Image (cartoon, rainbow, N blue to C red):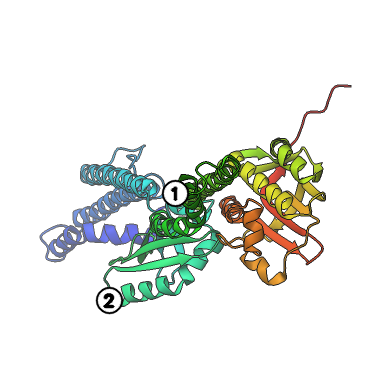
Amino acid sequence: MGRLPLRRVLGAAGLIGAVPAAVLLALTLAGALAPGPGLLGLLACLLGALLVATLWIHNLARLAEALRRAAAEDGRLVPPSGTPLLPAVEEIAEGVSRLARTLAEQGALVGRLRRADEAIVESLPDPLLVLSPERVPLRANAAARALFGGEGTGARGGPGGGDVAALLRHPALAAAVDRALADRRPQTADLALPVPVAREIAAQVIPMEPALADGGRIVIVLSDRTRERAVERMRADFVANASHELRTPLASLIGFIETLRGPAEDDRAARTRFLGIMAEQSERMRRLIDDLLGLSRIELTEHQPPTGQAHLAAIARAELAALEPLLQARRVTVLPALEEAALAVPADAEQLAQVVRNLLENAVRHGREGGEVRLRVGLGEGAGRRSEGRVAGVVLEVADDGPGIPKEHIPRLTERFYRVDKGRSRSAGGTGLGLAIVKHIVNRHRGQLTIESEEGAGASFRVWLPGVAEERPQAAA
């Protein structure tokens, strides 16, 4: 603490000693007091007033310094040390100290309540965003950061940039925010987000009046309806697709059964031939039902990224061995080029095995009989999120030397039950669901499926997946 201001000390001394000094001066001038004693009394009065003023100002300055320190630090008032305070100033200091303790306790309570509120918001299962009046994201809870790939930590962490920006630009949500700000009432909107994977989201937009402490004016609560809407669609699709695809083999079975009960009842050769055809049709129905159920399961979890990892080379080797009977029957030679370090992360190994199996079966069944199939597993680049550009990953490529695919059919190859040559596909044993299953599995892994083909020059199916090159321990010399 520096020197006391002289002007402030003199002003306080004047206020304290003005009245008694004026009385002494008046008595002296009136002759009631002798000039000598009167002047001495006046001087003593002024000196006493100056001393009291100095002590008061010093006490108050020390108290002010203690208050400044308390305000700049943690709010706790430390009583001034050194010269004892005047009783009145000490009472003021004690009162301020009690007030500071009360404020500190209330501040601690407010802090605990705020942290509890943030913990509740953070643990909500539905994604929640807080926006400024300019619609800039201020806060996002854990569910929102998981949905949009954000890296923030805590309830004040921010969501990922590209995906949440696309969400906020969605016309339906932007209109709901406009209505909420204009009407000052909650609004709802249904959103369909096509990237990074198709989602259907119900949004509730809540205007905050007054604004939140961080300036937030809009709270958006999102509810992912993808799964339940997918279930509704799959129920309808399953009935339609199953009835359509099962009608032919079922009609064949019924026809053969009626024939065996009637004209061919005693014809051993016809019975043997018909039973063989019935077995083939039954197997076709089994494969079709298995693929339909498998596709339904994959679609249910398509919006949930996998959490494991998969060694693509080992998976490809195992699936290749399992296809040996089909390879021999079609006299097809597979030329593998497998890079052992290719590790898909994150990945579902069982689903990726189905991708390898479907692509290999597709190449063997629809390629040239007695031909060759090239199978490659390795490292390669693919397109990540829009903000990431080209990113490293792993690549699975299956190419055949068959008749190829006309270009107009390529965009529709991954549709359910789509066949370039319906008769040939059925005779080859396909269900029309293999590439649809591949597409949905690749989507779940946030990967890419690329199909290239020219008529007469075979077809190539390339799958890119997020992944790394696994570090393998070197063998001892």
Q: Quadrant of residue 452?
A: bottom right
Secondary element at tag 1: helix
Q: Is residue 122 above or below residue 219?
A: above
Disc 1 packing (10 Å; few <14; some 14–19; many ≥20): many
Q: Earlier in the sequence, mark 2 or mark 1?
A: 1
Where in the figure is residue 26, as x and y percent of width and height? 14, 65
Asked whether, in this view, residue 196 is left or right of residue 402, the answer is: left
Amino acid on which the number 1 mark rests in the picture: Ala
- In this view, the residue in front, 345 or 368, is 368
| Res 347 → quadrant | top right
User: In the shown orientation, is residue 260 left or right of residue 472?
Assistant: left
Furthest residue to the bottom? 182
Question: Which residue is disc 2 drawn over?
Answer: 183
Q: Residue at x 54, y 51 (%)?
A: 151
Number of the label disc, if any, that sits on residue 94: none
Percent coordinates x, y for residue 2 in the rendering? 45, 51
Q: Are the residues tagged 2 and 1 within 8 Å (C-beta)?
A: no
Left or right side of 266 for 369: right
Compare residues 304 and 163 and report the one nearer the observer: 304
Farthest left residue?
32
| Amino acid beneath label 2 | Asp
Residue receiving disc 1? 142
In the foreground, 204 or 13: 204
| Alpha-carbon span between mark 2 and mark 1 | 30 Å
Residue drawn where x is 48% and y is 72% of the image: 169
